[in-house]
Image (cartoon, rainbow, N blue to C red):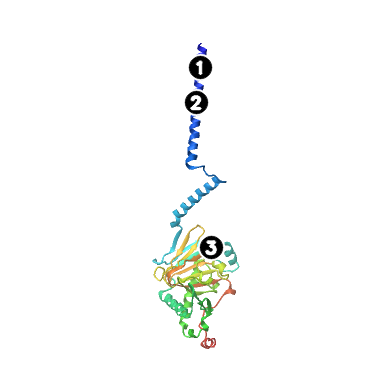
Amino acid sequence: MESENKHTKRKDATKERSKLTKTKSQEKEDDIKDTKSKYGPMPTFPYQRVFTRGILILGVLTVVYFGTKNGREVALARQKEVVHHRAQDISCSEDYKNELETFSGCVPQRCGRVVSDKLVSASEADALLGIAKRGMTLGGSQGGATILDLHSGALSQGKNFVNIYHLPSAKDVFKKTDFTFYKVVKTKIQNAVAHHFGVQPHRLHLTHPTFFSRLNAAPALTVHDEYWHPHVDKETYESFHYTSLLYLADYGRDFQGGRFVFIDGDNTNRTVEPRKGRVSMFTSGSENLHYVERVTAGTRYALTVSFTCDQKYAIDDPTLPPAPLREQKQ
């Protein structure tokens, strides 16, 4: 009797567990049915997990980029400060240094860039600005960039170039003193480049192109007007080994935009804000990838003075052509 009672209890307990299991299972099925009925079947597609992870990573990178964007730019020289001598050393690119090994006395002890506001006087900067303005009144690009090269006489005019020394209107536009100022400033920059980079001054030769530039906000009409693309001077101009820029107008006063930007390998842009009389000098290899920001208002004037170690690319200082020759070319 007692055995039958125990058997009955075990049977009842088994039934209870079975009912409980069925109840939970039924509830789960009901929940699934309710979900399907409310929202429909959940969509699936191949590589869903990979896609989800990609979206997550992209989101993180976006947050990191915008979170650090303000720290990606460093001012090497601001317009409002007076910089006596500020330098930044950069490791020389291998191709640049290997090429210079063949030019004794012209291999830099260091590569990089240097800025100085004490090299060219205010009167010298004003004199050179006057030369640029007088010459460019006889031409001018229809796009945003006008060039005047005193060595070759090249002057932007419309969508093309003309020789300013062949223009009848240029007969009295330049004076001998203009070329004297030009040579004095060029020699100052040449000696400063040699001193900073540790090369012999007489090993540096002026090279083509060396020119005045005028930039404004006009839309580009030819490739010559598109000055804002990142580039390396040595790749653009084979003869370049050392580049310098003399600014003849003030950023934030005479124009907006137009800053000079070095793009460095540490994902940082280092900017030079133009200041009248400021000179920026740098090695021309790929260690100094750079661009000029588009000018958005006003007019930006500058003088590019370039140097080579290769004497076959050397050019003489510009001189005023003799009057009979100018008249003959009219």
Query: Disc 3 marks which residue?
Result: 287
x and y, in percent, of residue 325 in the image: 54, 87
Q: Residues within 10 Å of mark 1 (few under 14, many from 20)?
A: few
Q: Amino acid at mark 1?
A: Thr
Choose mark 3 or mark 2, whichever is in front: 2
Q: Residues within 10 Å of mark 2 (few under 14, many from 20)?
A: few
- Residue projecting furthest to the right: 102
Q: Specify whether residue 312 is in view.
A: yes
Q: Are marks 3 and 2 in contact (CB under 8 Å)?
A: no
Q: Secondary structure at mark 1?
A: helix
x and y, in percent, of residue 56 in the image: 50, 48
258, 200: nearer the viewer: 258
Q: CA distance from mark 3 to mark 2?
A: 79 Å
Q: Secondary structure at mark 2?
A: helix
Q: Specify whether residue 110 is in view.
A: no
Query: Disc 1 marks which residue?
Result: 8
Q: Amino acid at mark 3?
A: Glu
Q: Residue at x 53, y 80 (%)?
A: 162
Instruction: Of the two numbered discs 1 and 2 on the same chain, state the one appearing first in sequence.
Output: 1
156 above or below 284?
below
- Residue projecting furthest to the front: 37
Q: Amino acid at mark 2?
A: Lys
